[in-house]
Amino acid sequence: MKNVLFNTFMIITISIVVTLVVLLQEYRSLQTEVWFLDVGQGDSVLFKSSRGKVVLVDGGLSDLVLLELGEVLSFSESTIDALFISHPHADHIGGVIQILEKYNVRNIYVNALEYDSDYVDVLKNQLSKIQLSTFVAGEVVQIDEFTITSLWPEESTCSLGINECAMSLLVEVNGVSILSTSDVEFDQFAKLGVNRVVDILKIPHQGSCNDNAGEWLSILDPRYMVVSVGENSYGHPCKQLLALIDNLGGEFYRTDHDGRIGFVISEIGQISPKVER
């Protein structure tokens, strides 16, 4: 009799736990989320719609991105609906190689991949059997509530330097604007055509120094700023830039101190930051 009661109790307990887990996943799926992943000295930004669609911009340098994705996505979420590759430097594409091996990636947006490196060679081989789309200035992709607009480059075959040709995106959702310019720095922002306030700004190029930073920080006047950075020998983020950010008065986060940085965006545009550490 005791065994029967115990077994019944265990079945009920397990059922309750499973139900709670399912309800938690359903609750999370109703949220619109933006995550700046902690991938060290590199970039990777994830957007997750309220219907569960996943958009990823870059993949950092290594398989650290897989650990980060495992924290943000559930075990059953194995599809990335859109992957944007900003430019072919290792700290942006190294993790993409790992992602393509583990996840089902439905759509890939990439411009020129002309750069001499082992990472590019491996990535080109992986992408050789996948249909790719270019994404140049003025083009727009709608994924659930996310409106993703390309600001730069003007053509898929950009003749400037690798960083200067990086894909720059304006993402708008529920009245909230997120500007992610990859490694396109402040002195090029006039070309992007964003002379407006934004809500969330990813500080470009791991926070490197730039003489035009103060002017553009004032124009953009972001409520939240994030720099994706890890241990490095370049002095990132730049001390002068940090002083400008401090004077601006918005909320500032950095992945080397705060870990993974998230923003939950409500249907009416309320922003709730979520910091790992």
Image: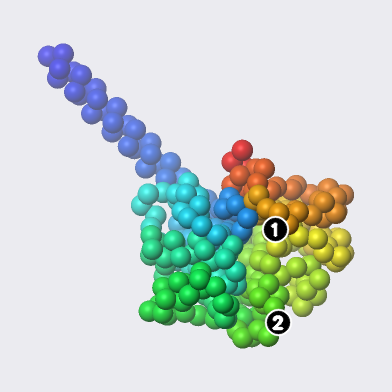
Badge 2 amino acid: Leu
**How many numbered circles are shown?**
2
Position of 245 with respect to 277 (left or right) is right
Residue in view at x 38 percent, y 79 percent: 129
In the rendered image, the residue lying farthest to the top is 2
Crowd band around label 1 with a 10 angstrom C-alpha radius: few (<14), some (14–19), many (20+) = many
Residue in view at x 78 percent, y 73 percent: 188
Residue in view at x 24 percent, y 25 percent: 10
Position of 239 with respect to 12 (left or right) is right
Instruction: Report the residue marked by disc 2.
Output: 160
Badge 1 amino acid: Gln
Callout 2: SS? loop
Question: Residues at badges 1 and 2 in contact (C-beta under 8 Å)?
Answer: no
Q: Which mark is residue 206?
A: 1
Q: CA distance from mark 1 to mark 2?
A: 20 Å
Quadrant where the image shows the C terminus? top right
Position of 277 with respect to 108 (left or right) is right
User: Where residue 232 sits: x, y (%)?
Assistant: 68, 53
Q: Is residue 123 above or below residue 260?
A: below
Quadrant where the image shows the N terminus? top left
Callout 1: SS? helix
Position of 64 with respect to 272 (left or right) is left
User: Where residue 78 sits: x, y (%)?
Assistant: 38, 58
User: Where residue 211 sits: x, y (%)?
Assistant: 86, 65
